[in-house]
């Protein structure tokens, strides 16, 4: 069974967290919502709650086949957590699927995941941040460069999740 972590922090974008959670559960994957603190309930931009099932400090990259980073303003909070950054860095080093949408690539900017001209996209307002982190920014609904998948906005969610599902299906069982 494939294992997917979806990161959470306050002010997450509702669709960018819940669409992947339900889509991957529907596909039969084990999905774990991971935040800085286990058991803490994080409100979305509109106040919709999501409770972290595990703390980032209590899981390892090896526990998952993919890590999903939703947007909204939660990435700005996520990257303040050393445990979250360690999890994402370790997943990148291990070649695990890292998928970030909208402002989600902000977390990737705080790691090595975008260095060396990796092609990536995100919400247009963070284009400079991504470029400064080493990415070659592309305006496309989904960009796959190796094990990193990025998209721009909630409108890109169908292509975003399809790309992640494709990569997961290509992994050995």
Image: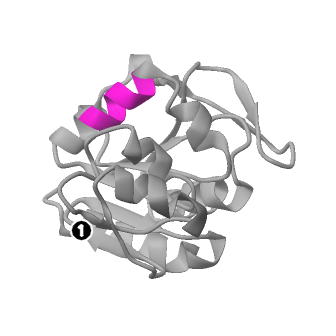
Q: Is residue 159 magenta?
A: no
93 is higher (above) or lower (below) than 13:
above
At a point 37% along the width and 66% down the height, the residue shown is: 164
Measured from the top left, where is residue 67 in percent x and y?
A: 39, 47
Expressed as whole percent of the image width and height from the top left, the position of residue 103 reads: 57, 55
Q: Quadrant of residue 142?
A: bottom left
Q: Is residue 86 magenta?
A: yes
Residue 76 image point, x, y percent: 59, 38
The colour scheme used to paint the residues is: one colour
Q: Residue at x 19, y 64 (%)?
A: 146
In the rendered image, is residue 99 in sight?
Answer: no
Q: Nearer the viewer, residue 54 or 109?
A: 109
Count of picture labels: 1
Query: Front-most of 40 and 144?
Result: 144
Q: Decide whether the magenta segment is chiefly helix, strand or loop.
A: helix
Q: Residue at x 73, y 28 (%)?
A: 41
Whether residue 48 is visible here, answered yes or no, is yes
Q: Is residue 167 above or below residue 96?
A: below
Give the x, y percent position of residue 129.
Answer: 46, 52
**Does residue 162 appear left or right of residue 40 in this picture?**
left
SS class of the residue under badge 1? strand
Q: Residue furthest right?
A: 47
Quarter of the picture containing the C terminus is bottom left
Is the residue marked by circle 1 packed among few (<14), some (14-19), or many (20+) residues within 10 Å?
Answer: few
Q: Which residue is mark 1?
A: 145
Where does the magenta region start and end?
83-89
User: Residue placed at 69% from the left, 61% from the top?
Assistant: 15
Compared to residue 26, the image places residue 10 above or below, namely: above
């Amino acid at each position: 069974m494939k294992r997917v972590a979806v990161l959470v922090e306050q002010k997450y974008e509702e669709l960018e967290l819940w669409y992947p959670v339900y889509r991957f559960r529907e596909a039969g994957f084990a999905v774990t919502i991971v935040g800085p603190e286990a058991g803490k309930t994080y409100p979305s931009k509109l106040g919709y709650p999501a409770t972290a099932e595990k703390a980032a400090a209590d899981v390892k990259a090896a526990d998952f086949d993919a890590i999903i980073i939703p947007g909204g303003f939660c990435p700005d909070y996520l990257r303040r957590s050393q445990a979250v950054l360690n999890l994402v860095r370790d997943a990148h080093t291990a070649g695990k699927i890292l998928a970030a949408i909208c402002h989600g690539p902000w977390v990737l900017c705080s790691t090595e995941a975008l260095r060396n001209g990796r092609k990536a996209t995100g919400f247009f307002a963070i284009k400079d941040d991504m470029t400064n982190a080493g990415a070659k920014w592309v305006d496309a609904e989904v960009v796959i460069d190796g094990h990193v998948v990025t998209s721009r906005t909630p409108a890109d969610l169908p292509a975003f999740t399809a790309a992640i599902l494709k990569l997961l299906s290509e992994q050995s069982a």
